[in-house]
Image (cartoon, rainbow, N blue to C red):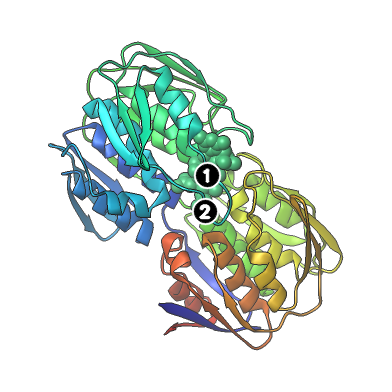
Amino acid sequence: MDSLLIKGGVPLHGDVTISGSKNAALPIMAATLLTPEPCVIRRVPDLSDTRFMLQILASLGARVSMRGDAVRVCAEKLNPVGNYDLIRKMRGSICILGPLLARQRQATVSLPGGCVIGPRPIDLHLKGLRTLGARVAIESGYIHAKAPRLVGAEVFLGGRSGPTVLGTANLLMAATLTEGVTTIESAACEPEIADLAHFLNKMGARIAGAGSPTITVNGVQALHGTDHELIPDRIEAATFAIAAAATNGEVTLLGSRPDHMSAVMDKLQEAGVSIKRRGFTLTVRRGGRLRPVDITTQPYAGFPTDVQAQMMALMALTPGLSIITERIYESRFMHVSELARLGAEISIEGASAIVKGVSRLSGAPIMASDLRASAALVIGGMAAAGTTRINRIYHLDRGYEKIDVKLRRLGARIRRVEE
Ligand code: EPU
């Protein structure tokens, strides 16, 4: 297992190119199962999660290849069952359920369990598919879905914490090959859903309203192959922007989508960070003294839960009191105890973290717990005086393409070592 060794206190400077979005890549790769024709997806980030998804598609019988950042998938013939050990390993594999059901009229996918950031139920995914006519049973840890016939319907997908992103993706994909019209109300509005709908429409689907809470899908008989470039990863971009501010540096994000990052940019500016925007380029610099901000995570276009931990690392170094409230997941505060090892002063009260900014963090050995918590620890380590060793960084490799290489190019003193 690898660790990251960081010598902190070096401001980041330079340009970084933003990779394609992980959370757009996973459902779009799964959507290639909807057609027997070849699809090409470009700007696919090289991550353990995207590699897993390729292996899952291959285990289902698809021919897959990856050249540079272009992935080609041809699901001409599918096996009735895939490799369940693989499917079980990755939570995002739930998004093969909708396409398999639509294409083969049956699917078996392992039931994702809870995880370190809280329970991850899939009741809304199943509700959606059942409303289209699927019979769904859960047995021995697997979801078995069957649908001799799928018929369009009206589905309300709102849950306790708001809409569901992958639930919307699953239903959207299943509805493309369904008789009649499906209307999804309280659909997730994330840019990754709009990108998936864009991909599906290029395959011949008839989807309107994606990116808004009401999506309409006119079912078609078959979909065809296509070529698509993924949107940039707004969470990776936000992570580099926060790292620039935390290390008192200046970083230019190339190939980003500032229009997908309004909530994050707004909070950074409120905190005193200077952001200059030119087309798809953002230049981020700590303007002067940072100010504390209060943040509540929300579904898009609100502040993303996937940036909560990184923002907390920045607020840990911002004089004054910040209150960060997590509304999407029950226990996404695993980074708090590790940031405390670096000297941060953070207490948890219910769904809120009260962050009392300190003037200095100092390096320490710490442990990564989940993907975004790991990113927060990297930011904390780069801003801290002295050396930080982060163990269990395989979490980072799930979602950040070559993060150590990209940070080194920006001047960070960071290297990968064997644990
Ligand atoms: N929920 C339900 N029932 C369901 C589905 C979800 O109650 O059937 C609840 C969840 O418990 C949670 C909330 O709804 O409280 C939102 O969950 P959602 O379904 O939107 O999450 P997801 O689709 O499983 C995706 C991203 C996550 C990101 C969330 C929220 C992918 C592969 N994953 O997960 O990304 O946090 O949306 O934006 O797209 C990450 O990249 O680090 C990550 C965790």
Q: How many neighbours does mark 1 have within 10 angstroms: few (below 14), some (14-19), or many (20 or more)? A: some
Give x and y (percent) for residue 236: 52, 58
Q: Mark 1 points at which residue?
A: 120
Secondary structure found at label 2? loop
Q: Is residue 195 left or right of residue 315?
A: left
Residue at 16 percent across and 35 percent down: it is 37
Q: How many neighbours does mark 2 have within 10 angstroms: few (below 14), some (14-19), or many (20 or more)? A: few
Q: In this view, does 40 lie above or below 35?
A: below
Q: In this view, does 375 lie above or below 360?
A: above
Give x and y (percent) for residue 240: 57, 64
Would residue 311 be seen by someone viewing this image from the given angle?
yes
Q: In this view, does 178 lie to the left or right of 216?
A: left
Q: Is mark 1 within 8 Å of ligand 1?
A: yes
Give x and y (percent) for residue 346: 78, 66
Residue at 79 percent across and 69 percent down: it is 288
The amino acid type found where label 1 is placed reads: Arg
Q: Name the residue under label 2.
A: 115
Q: Are the two marked residues, 2 and 1, in contact with CB atoms closer than 8 angstroms?
A: yes
**Snapshot quadrant of residue 89:** bottom left
Marks 2 and 1, the one that precedes in the sequence:
2
The amino acid type found where label 2 is placed reads: Cys
